[in-house]
Image (cartoon, grey):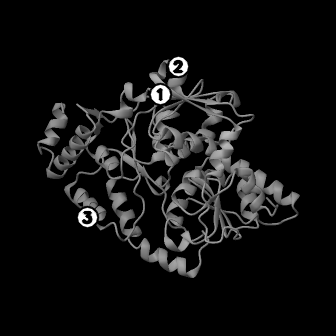
């Protein structure tokens, strides 16, 4: 590993023992993947994936204390994934007690994050790149992030560069200001090894299309053609690509995708981004139907009445909140219902929720009984107590990691508004 003088000084301990250990760890990590140098981080802010104060994460809290005590805090301010708890989200007494034990270190951990450099209380979200949140990297920026849906969005939609790092490595990179140069940081690593031909009769559901691609290409890079015709420009596609990317990253391990005529690198380099030995995968209506039917339903009673619906994993954009508000309000009026018939939680970044409160849609949802939260649905669901509940969702990420049952958006809308599906 060839280090710059600044990097070498840190490695040699000239900025303290803790920073030296962190740099040594990153060097070993990079050498494992064939990196021959470190790349300096150029983004304004970092993003951490570990937001939850699980009682079993004692080594993490001890590590954070050592970093704080040494003064080796992040060179960047950072955002972090959503919190796991919200008193407004429905739960029974047993679940309430379980949460208090499971996340007993949450308040202590929040204090550690403040000392390490979190941007503030509005910084807890998996969609840190939203304009309302303010952690939006520029094209070509080198990042040290570890949230899979945020990484794939930054790489693909924004044209930044970041590998799919693990938790804590994201903080390490921010502390020493550099990350190993390999994989998706390199031009060669960003070449597409799959050509995806979308041949559906209408715009495919983002969650299903992303799932199909993720399960097929796994960690490789897909170049998608035939999807651009459904969008006027990239701005109009961002909410769609957010959910699409999250599904590719969770149902597979995609860290970067290219959409012909939409995403920055595909616009600039076109099909030159395709590697010479690329493979082809055609997705039509029948293929999407096959993928959806392959999802297991792991409820104890497969015909149980849903007790909760989650919308927003990853967190919703303000455009999506407005759209859901109008659709729910319209459907409830159509079905002669006053409130949603299944307890429903919609999640978005704290800063997005603040802005949404100025929209008519906020009052519509509140009046219709919908809870608007900044919780992490995955961390709410990912425990034995909530795992027993029959929960429905239109998120493929939540379906993949929990016992939640997947429903397409229109089907879920019908379910929560009292219309038979």
Image quadrant of residue 12? Answer: top left
CB atoms of marks 3 and 2 within 8 Å:
no
Q: Could you tell me which quadrant the N terminus lies in?
A: top left
User: Which residue is labeled 2 in the image?
Assistant: 271
Which of the two discs, 1 and 2, labels the residue nearer the N terminus? 1
* Image position, residue 68 (x, y; %): 25, 58
* Image position, residue 368 (x, y; %): 76, 63
Image quadrant of residue 70? Answer: bottom left
Which of the two discs, 3 and 2, labels the residue nearer the N terminus? 3
Q: What residue sits 36% from the left and 42% below the top?
A: 144
Query: Label 2: how many residues lie within 10 Å, few (<14), some (14-19) or many (20+)?
Result: some
CB atoms of marks 3 and 1 within 8 Å:
no
User: Which residue is labeled 1 in the image?
Assistant: 192
Which of the two discs, 3 and 1, labels the residue nearer the N terminus? 3
> In front here: 89 or 399?
399
> In front here: 389 or 118?
389
Circle on res. 62 = 3
SS for callout 3: helix
Horizontally, residue 398 falls left or right of residue 410, namely left
* Image position, residue 270 (x, y; %): 53, 19
Residue 83 visible in rendering:
yes
Q: Give the vertical position of 378 relative to 268 (above or below).
A: below
Circle on res. 340 = none
SS for callout 1: strand
Residue 136 visible in rendering:
no
Query: Label 1: how many residues lie within 10 Å, few (<14), some (14-19) or many (20+)?
Result: many
Q: What residue sits 71% from the left and 38% below the top?
A: 285
Q: Nearer the viewer, mark 3 or mark 1?
A: 1
Alpha carbons under labels 3 and 2: distance apart: 48 Å
């Amino acid at each position: 590993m060839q280090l710059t003088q600044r990097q070498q000084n840190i490695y040699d301990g000239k900025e303290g023992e803790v920073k030296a250990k962190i740099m040594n760890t990153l060097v070993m990590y990079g050498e494992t993947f064939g990196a021959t140098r470190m790349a300096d981080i150029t983004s304004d802010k970092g993003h951490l994936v570990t937001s939850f104060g699980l009682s079993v994460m004692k080594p993490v809290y001890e590590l954070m204390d050592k970093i704080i005590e040494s003064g080796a805090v992040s060179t960047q301010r950072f955002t972090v994934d959503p919190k796991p708890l919200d008193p407004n989200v429905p739960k029974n007494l047993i679940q309430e007690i379980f949460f208090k034990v499971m996340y007993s270190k949450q308040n202590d951990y929040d204090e550690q994050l403040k000392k390490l450099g979190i941007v503030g209380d509005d910084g807890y979200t998996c969609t840190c790149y939203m304009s309302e949140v303010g952690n939006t990297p520029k094209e070509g920026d080198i990042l040290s992030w570890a949230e899979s849906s945020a990484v794939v969005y930054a790489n693909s939609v924004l044209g930044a560069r970041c590998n799919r790092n693990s938790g804590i490595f994201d903080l390490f990179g921010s502390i020493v200001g550099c990350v190993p140069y390999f994989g998706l940081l390199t031009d060669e690593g960003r070449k597409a090894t799959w050509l995806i031909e979308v041949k559906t009769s209408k715009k495919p559901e983002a969650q299903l299309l992303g799932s199909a691609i993720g399960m097929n290409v796994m960690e490789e890079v897909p170049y998608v053609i035939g999807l651009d015709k459904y969008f006027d420009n990239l701005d109009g596609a961002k909410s769609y690509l957010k959910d699409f990317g999250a599904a590719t990253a969770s149902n597979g391990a995609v860290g970067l995708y290219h959409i012909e005529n939409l995403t920055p690198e595909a616009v600039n380099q076109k099909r030159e981004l395709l590697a010479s030995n690329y493979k082809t995968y055609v997705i039509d209506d029948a293929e999407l139907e096959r993928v959806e039917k392959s999802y297991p339903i792991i409820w104890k009673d497969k015909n149980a009445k849903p007790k909760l619906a989650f919308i927003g994993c990853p967190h919703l954009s303000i455009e999506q909140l407005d759209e859901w508000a109008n659709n729910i309000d319209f459907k409830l009026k159509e079905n002669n219902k006053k409130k949603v018939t299944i307890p429903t939680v919609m999640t978005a970044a704290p800063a997005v929720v603040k802005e949404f409160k100025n929209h008519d849609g906020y009052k519509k949802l509140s009046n219709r009984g919908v809870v608007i939260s900044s919780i992490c649905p995955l961390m709410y669901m990912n425990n034995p107590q909530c795992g027993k509940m029959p929960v429905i969702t239109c998120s493929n990420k939540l379906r993949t990691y929990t016992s939640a049952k997947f429903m397409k958006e229109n089907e879920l809308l019908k379910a929560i508004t009292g219309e038979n599906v």
